[in-house]
Amino acid sequence: MRGAPKERIGISKSHGKLQFFIRNYGKKIYLPENHELVIPLLQKYYEEKCLEITEKRIEAVDAFLKIDSSTSCEEIYNNMDPKLRQFINPLGLTLDEKIERWNNMKYEPYLAHPEELVFNTDGGDKVRSKSEKIIADILYKHGVLYHYEMPLFIGNKMIVPDFTIYDAKNNRIIYWEHLGMMDNSQYFMRAMDKYKMYVLAEKDVFLTMESGNKPLDIDMVEKKAVQQLTRDHTLVQTMVDRGEISSEEAQNHPKKHYITRAIGVGDTLDIDYQMYQLKKGSQVLLCTDGLSNSLRPEKLPDQLKSCIRKESLQELIDYANNQGGADNITAVVLYRS
């Protein structure tokens, strides 16, 4: 302890009274209660006890976090070999069943001004604007599950999100609102009132905007549609899943490289199995963390666009190395033509 005496105090009892002592070359030297060393040594004794129990708790937490305790029964089933799944009755809905239920969901679409539904999307919907068609086509291309203009009831009021997106992996609903006339003051006020309803109801909502002078940012829409397909088997990913730290904090966390699964450390190996249907134009980047840790997520879509050519993939690896990459890098890009 900073500023504390170097001696350590001993405490004993004699005839019901506390006695204090220090040791000098193994010999006890008793101190009267009013000795100038008693109070600082007792404070040191107390703080050392607190430090000891705190260190034990940290060790226990570290040991706990090394176990991937956030894994659910659903994840265990979804990560099993498909050949094994046929022999097992899962507890709860599987990922495939959730997706099927979403795709088969029946709802009464918003039918006001049907004459405005003039733009056909790649997914078979009709939408009201070119920008909504762009958003819908990008979502469809990346395999993002969504429903268009599915009414949402908040209390006794109904609002109509442009896109209701289902994150099946995390069982989460996200609402995407495209605000296309932000230079119209009345439209702007109605849009803000609608956004306030989302916020007060604690809904996850994402906004895109445009005006006469500033069109829809298509690159930004592409970036939002890019998704990480696999889950990192790391300590910090477990902490992110539990809500203990943010994704941004995980990028520079001191325990970023602590892994929870590895090849060659045990007799058995848990392997994740996942199935995805790739739409035309989809790209999948398979890489080690030597590459992904050196790339900025917000720039990844732009970088992936140039990865169809082999030489561009090498450029991506060179970029990661120039950013200070200190790990081995292996990368493959799959492209659905």
Image (cartoon, rainbow, N blue to C red):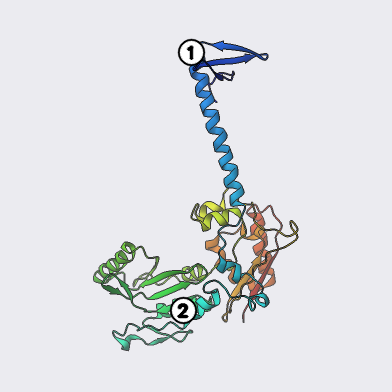
Q: Which residue is mark 2?
A: 102
x and y percentages locating residue 247 in the rendered image = 52, 56
Nearer the observer, disc 1 or disc 2? 1
- Judge left or right: residue 276 versus residue 40: right
Q: Percent position (x, y) of residue 105?
A: 43, 82
Q: Identify which residue, 157 or 22, lies in the foreground.
A: 22
Residue 45 drawn above or below residue 135: above
Q: Quadrant of the C terminus?
A: bottom right
| Residue 195 on image: x %, y % | 32, 66
Depth check: give the residue in front, 61 or 230.
Answer: 61
Q: Amino acid at mark 1?
A: Glu
Task: Give the residue type that dot 2 points to.
Answer: Trp
Q: Whole-percent x and y of residue 255?
A: 60, 48
Please rate how many residues cluster around mark 1, counting C-alpha atoms within 10 Å: few if below 14, some from 14 to 19, many from 20: few
Q: CA distance from mark 1 to mark 2?
A: 74 Å
Task: Answer left or right for 127 relative to 297.
Answer: left
Q: Tell me if residue 241 comes above or below residue 333 in the rendering.
A: above
Residue lying furthest left in this view? 186
Q: Which residue is mark 1?
A: 33
Tell me if label 1 and label 2 are in contact, CB under 8 Å: no
Q: Secondary structure at mark 2?
A: helix
Mark 1 vs mark 2: which is more N-terminal? 1
> With 36 as the anchor, is 199 left or right in this view?
left
Query: Does the image show residue 190?
Result: yes
**175 in relation to 296, above or below:** below
**Label 1 element class:** loop
Res. 269 image quadrant: bottom right
